[in-house]
Image: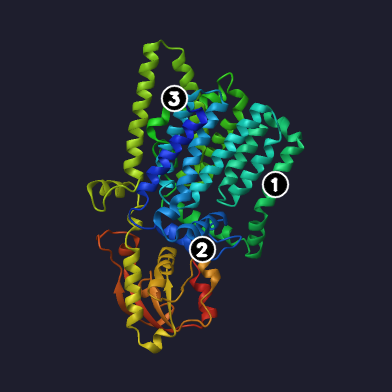
Amino acid sequence: MQKRITFNDTAVLVLLALVRLAVHLATNGQYGFHRDELAIIDDARFLAWGYVAYPPLTPFVGRLALELFGPSLVGIRFFAALAQSGAMVVTGLMARELGGTRRAQVLAALAAAIAPMSLIMGALFQYIAFDYLWWVLIAYLLIRLLKSDNPRWWLGLGAVIGLGMMTKYTLAVFVAGLIVGVIATPARKQLKSPWLWGGVALSLLIFLPNLIWQIQHDFISLEFLSDIHARDVAIGRTADFLPMQLIVSANPFTLPLWLAGLYFYFFAPDGKRYQALGWMYVSSLILFLILHGRFYYLTPAYPLLLAGGAVVGERWLARKSTRQAQWGWGVTGAALAAGAVLGGVLMLPIAPVNSAMWQMTSQVHDNFVEQIGWPELVATVANIYTDLPAEEQAVAGILTGNYGEAGAINLYSPAYGLPEVISGINSYWLRGYGNPPPQVLIVVGFSQAAAERYFIACDLAGQVSNRYGVENEETRFHPDIFVCRGLRQPWPELWPDLQSFG
């Protein structure tokens, strides 16, 4: 007689996560690298304890991916997809710790998985994918601590917080929410525990190398963050914070679920034990509103609400008649399916370029259009370089205005024998202008007027285009490529003026 295969709850969650991972592996080879990915991949070539735009953990993971998979789209994005799939499992485990059965665990995991921002995080290699995982792990570990009343969990919390701060500095807002949650609830008794302070010490120890790097570089990342924040506010990128919580940070089809999660933490009799998590969400929401944060900064806080909401929903349906419960689960399943279709269509790289679906997604966000045209840009630069006289090639360099151009040229340059790119943006500026410095520059990403601020003569040598005719930042705002000669100032005087943040 054939033995029947059975799965425990954790195995079911892992199986669902593997299905999601497989979806990302099957689709992540579309289009090309995003400009943000190109910057991280290029920084991964220069491992350090800090970078201007972000802490060091994500470039380290990028270096690992490069060593394992080479410059493969699917390979580079593997760890981001894995982080999002892992967060699914942890969200289901949160529902279990809060008292949910398998149904609640699966519901919570799937609801977290179909959030549009989570889907795009699994489709791009960016630090937000790993930041998301750390937030979810912090919530899970806090639930374990509050449930067991075992203060040793603070060491795990401290370790994850340290890793989170080595990934994205906005984790500090969630940590502030954690502090509010502890002080505002009976969890304040933990303040007397040496394990809590041991966790604090451990988080600081993990973060210390980046802190030392910031000190050595005059806290340049604070200058960067201030500059970028002022830009975001000025152009309105922070104005839609609240509505975007409903439709992108958490899927609109899961709105009743995460609202039920808020009810669970603040009003459910057995949820009040975990009220610190409710305060973590509310405090983070308020802080980001006050600080004018971008909408996706709060995305990692929704799994903790979805876990609580799944428990509330399961218990509510358990009190109904069999027919009502079946109907309720059916409606829930249909809502998840509709949300998955919505999120998948908008955020997974599945639409053929310039198809109707592509045009629709491009109206919603620019993540896909910014992946088009990088190989063509590099080929154009290579042709310009090859056409230079031999004596100029020997002293030529490439100057770019943004990190996407720099990262793309450095990534594909081995096939063309191009020199290392120099740029004034972010960590490129810290690396300098080379030794010996170039005398003839191929200039990408500048208008002619901007280029002629630094060079005496700039001749138009080519234009940026792509085979699909897709309009993006490169083709719209700075399509011209110049060959420039004659510096208006010596490099040591010119270089500080070229510094920029982006």
Can you tell which of label 3 and label 1 is closer to the viewer?
Answer: 3
Tell which circle, 2 or 1, labels the residue nearer the N-terminal end: 2
How many numbered markers are drawn? 3
Find numbered disc 2 in the image and state the secondary structure of the residue it sits on.
helix
Quadrant housing the N terminus? top left
Question: Disc 3, disc 2: CB below 8 Å?
Answer: no
The answer to whether the residue labelled 3 contacts the one labelled 1, judged by CB atoms less than 8 Å apart, is no
Badge 3 density bin: few <14, some 14–19, many ≥20, Cα 10 Å = few
Residue 177 point in image, percent of width and height = 60, 38
As measured in the structure, the alpha-carbon distance from the residue carrying label 2 to the one carrying label 1 is 27 Å
Could you tell me the amino acid type at mark 3? Arg
Closer to us: 401 or 209: 209
Q: Position of residue 6 (x, y in %)?
A: 47, 26
Question: Given the image, on which type of amino acid does mark 1 rest?
Answer: Leu
The vertical placement of 282 against 54, above or below, is above
Q: Which mark is residue 9?
A: none
Mark 3 → mark 1, Cα distance in angstroms: 46 Å
Q: Is 34 drawn above or below residue 241 in the view shown?
A: below
Residue lying farthest to the front in this orientation: 1
* Residue corresponding to mark 3: 4
**Which residue: 44% across, 57% down?**
37
* Front one among 28 and 501: 28
> Mark 2 = which residue?
43
Q: Position of residue 101 (x, y in %)?
A: 51, 22
* Amino acid type, residue under disc 2 in the picture: Asp
- Quick one: which residue is furthest to the top in this view? 321
First reached walking from the N terminus: tag 3 or tag 2: 3
Residue 202 shows which numbered tag?
1
Looking at the image, which is closer to me, 182 or 328? 328
